[in-house]
Image (tube, grey):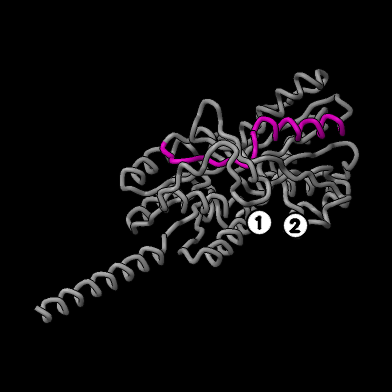
Amino acid sequence: MRRRFVFFGALVCLFVLFGFAACGLAAEKKYKIATVVKVDGIAWFDRMRIGVDEYAKETGHDLWMVGPAKTDAAEQVQIIEDLIAQGVDALCIVPFSVEALEPVLKKARDAGIVVICHEASTQENVDLIIEAFDNYAYGANIMKDLGANMGGKGGYICTVGSLTSKSQNEWIDGAIAYQKENFPDMYEVTPRIETYDDATVDYQKIKEALVAHSDLKGICGGPMPTSAGAGLAIEERGLQGKVFFTGTGLPSIAGQYLKSGAIQTIQFWDPATAGKVMNKIAIAFLDGKRDEIKDGANLGFTGFESVKQDPEKKNLFYGAGWVVVTKENADEYDF
């Protein structure tokens, strides 16, 4: 009888030990999460990679960033296809073309992969979309500064990385709406210009526009590289104070043109923070805590202390605010 009791006690101890071991393994589970951006190798996404790498160290999860060498929807799709085949746990996506990604993101979700998107307010095959702010308000603020610099009169152009880049086009929609309401004597000299998030293309197309349109006084830049392309084109032609630029940019790229007076204002949010926020949400979903991402939730990062849920599209959330930089405060930012 005593032997049976001892044997039973030993079995209980083994079960307890195995239970603790299983709990330990569960607690130590590392998720594999890839952040896929629209193009690799530009300053904006170099900064996002810093955020992803930092968050990997903070959390212990296997997090990394990848993107095509050029802005190409097919290449981004292929990268995602490869990641699905590798069996990643989640994908954090900054789409080049929302429409082009719908089929492959559906495939990812059908495979049980969590999909989080950024700069993609109309994406459908996604678990959650996190935007840094309301896109129309962001664009309106760009136009507010541009109109003031232009004295509320004259022609302008708008640039977007792609005509299918939803967030950038919403920025420009917001900018144009603000212009029509507040600066009736301003007008677009040509439909929005597609620049493929490439400063060289921006530079060439802005030069062409300056030659073709003598009434061009303003440039409203959606993609970050336009700030550098516009600055160089304006500087080379000695048009400081005659042609004005406001739009998305980074101090590391556009700072020299702010200081020279070739451009007036840049706006941005920190892409490193956006990378961290996307991955934090993905981890929450994988941990079964998706209900914690709700209206008013504090995600623990600057600009995301109280996210707002879109009243109609329930899986769309916005952060709060953006940074406005001129030559006076450009030195305050080191990226």
Identified by mark 2, the residue type is: Ser
Look at mark 1 in the image and give the residue it sits on: 43
Relative height, residue 165 to residue 115 (above, below): above
Q: Residue furthest bottom?
A: 3
Q: Is residue 141 magenta?
A: yes
Instruction: Specify the quadrant of the image occupied by residue 99.
Output: top left
Say whether disc 2 or disc 1 marks the residue closer to the N-terminus: 1
Q: Give the residue displayed 35% in from the left and 67% down from the top.
A: 25
The residue stretch that appears in magenta: 125-149
Image coordinates of residue 24 in percent, x first then y, are 37, 68
Q: Are marks 2 and 1 in contact (CB under 8 Å)?
A: yes
Relative height, residue 242 to residue 191 (above, below): below
Of the numbered discs in the image, which one, if any, rests on residue 240? none
Nearer to me, 217 or 302: 302
Image coordinates of residue 272 in percent, x first then y, are 63, 55
Distance of label 2 from label 1 (alpha carbons) = 8 Å
Q: What is the secondary structure assignment of the residue under circle 2?
A: helix
Identified by mark 1, the residue type is: Ala
Look at mark 2 in the image and give the residue it sits on: 252
Is 17 placed left or right of 9 in the picture?
right
Q: Is residue 136 magenta?
A: yes
